[in-house]
Every structure is written in structure tokens, then in C-alpha cells.
Image (tube, grey):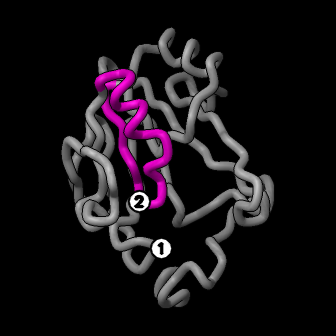
């Protein structure tokens, strides 16, 4: 896990064959007593050890149906609540503890629903106090060290998605 800010961490897992070799990223927030994990890919032993030093997650948030990844296993391991977008709940094959929609609060985060994206529930999470925005697939880091949208084929209407 790499620190991005004093209380924001990230880790990545490379998946061969993924779009242009993009890594799948997870985010971990230390927010007072809350420990919030977002879109978690699997963690290795060292990452679990580091995570446990920071404090086990209390909440796991999935920003879209395609980002379930290791969330169910981490929910089971740490006893954290798993929250998913309400509009994607029927696409998620896992036991969840709750759903969210645009404007809901999850700890210090405010959900921002994103229309016309890859899945109906695509959401970003805004941590106003830290001036931090966490985005699932609406913006990706490709090419490396840059920002772009997913390939056009991922959207029903790419013009609406860009808007």
C-alpha cells in the first residue's frame, strides 16, 4: 500500500489482458474511527499486514458492479460492511450490507452518481474535508500518468458519458 496523502492509501494489481495493461487500483481511507476500503483488488500478505497496522476496514465501498473484485473475501476476513450502488445491486453476486445513491453519505464521503457511464450505478466519492475525489471508472489512469475515459465501446452513448 502506497500513501497518497496522510490518510489515503492505494494499491494496485496488474491483470494481464486488461485494457492497455491498466492496473486495478484500490483505495483505503483512514477517517477518524472509520476505515473505508474502495474497489479493493486482492491484497498480498504484506499489504494485509500494512492494512492491519492502519486498522481493519469498517466499510467496503464498490463504485460500480465491475469493481466487486476482492470485496466479498475482505468483508468476510475483516467483518466490514459492504456497500454497493443501488442501481447496480442486481448485477452484484455477493451478500451486501447496504446500497447507496447520489447524495448519500458513507462516513465522511458524499456519493456522486455519474449518469451514462459503464454501469447504471457508477459513482464517485467526494471527501470534502480532504478535497479528495475518488473515481471508479469514469476516469482512468491511461495512458500511464495521464487521464482518459474507458474505450468508447464500453458506453451505450459515449457523447453522454463524456458530458
Q: Which residue is drawn at 34% across and 28% down?
A: 76
Q: Residue at x 41, y 71 (%)?
A: 119
Packing grade of label 1 (10 A; few <14, some 14-19, many >=20) is many
The kind of secondary structure element at disc 2 is: loop
> Who comes first in sequence, dot 2 or dot 1?
2
- Distance in Å between CA atoms under marks 2 and 1: 8 Å
Mark 2–mark 1 contact, CB under 8 Å? yes
Any magenta on residue 61?
yes
Q: Residue furthest top?
A: 53
**Residue with the mark numbered 1:** 118
- Please tell me which residue lies in front, 153 or 117: 153
**Residue with the mark numbered 2:** 64
Q: Can residue 102 be seen in this view?
A: no
**Residue 135 in the image, given as x and y percentages of width and height:** 50, 55
**Residue 28 in the image, given as x and y percentages of width and height:** 49, 31
> To which quarter of the image does residue 89 belong?
bottom left
Q: Residue at x 36, y 44 (%)?
A: 61
Vertical arrangement, residue 70 with respect to residue 122, above or below: above
> To which quarter of the image does residue 3 belong?
top right
> To which quarter of the image does residue 91 belong?
bottom left
Instruction: Tell me where the magenta segment starts and ends, as one range.
Output: 58-79
Amino acid at each position: 500500500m502506497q500513501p497518497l496523502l496522510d490518510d489515503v492509501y492505494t494499491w494496485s494489481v496488474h491483470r494481464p489482458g486488461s485494457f492497455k495493461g491498466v492496473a486495478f487500483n484500490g483505495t483505503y481511507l483512514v477517517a477518524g474511527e472509520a476505515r473505508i476500503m474502495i474497489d479493493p483488488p486482492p491484497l498480498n500478505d504484506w499489504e494485509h499486514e500494512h492494512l492491519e497496522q492502519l486498522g481493519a476496514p469498517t466499510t467496503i465501498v464498490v463504485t460500480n458492479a465491475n469493481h466487486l473484485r476482492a470485496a466479498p473475501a475482505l468483508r468476510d476476513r475483516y467483518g466490514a460492511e459492504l456497500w454497493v450502488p443501488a442501481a447496480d445491486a442486481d448485477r452484484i453476486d455477493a451478500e451486501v450490507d447496504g446500497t447507496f445513491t447520489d447524495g448519500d453519505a458513507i462516513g465522511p464521503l458524499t456519493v456522486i452518481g455519474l449518469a451514462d457511464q459503464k454501469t447504471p450505478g457508477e459513482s464517485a466519492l467526494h471527501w470534502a474535508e480532504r478535497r479528495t475525489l475518488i473515481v471508479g471508472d469514469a476516469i482512468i489512469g491511461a495512458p500511464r500518468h495521464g487521464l482518459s475515459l474507458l474505450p468508447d465501446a464500453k458506453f451505450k452513448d459515449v457523447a453522454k458519458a463524456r458530458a
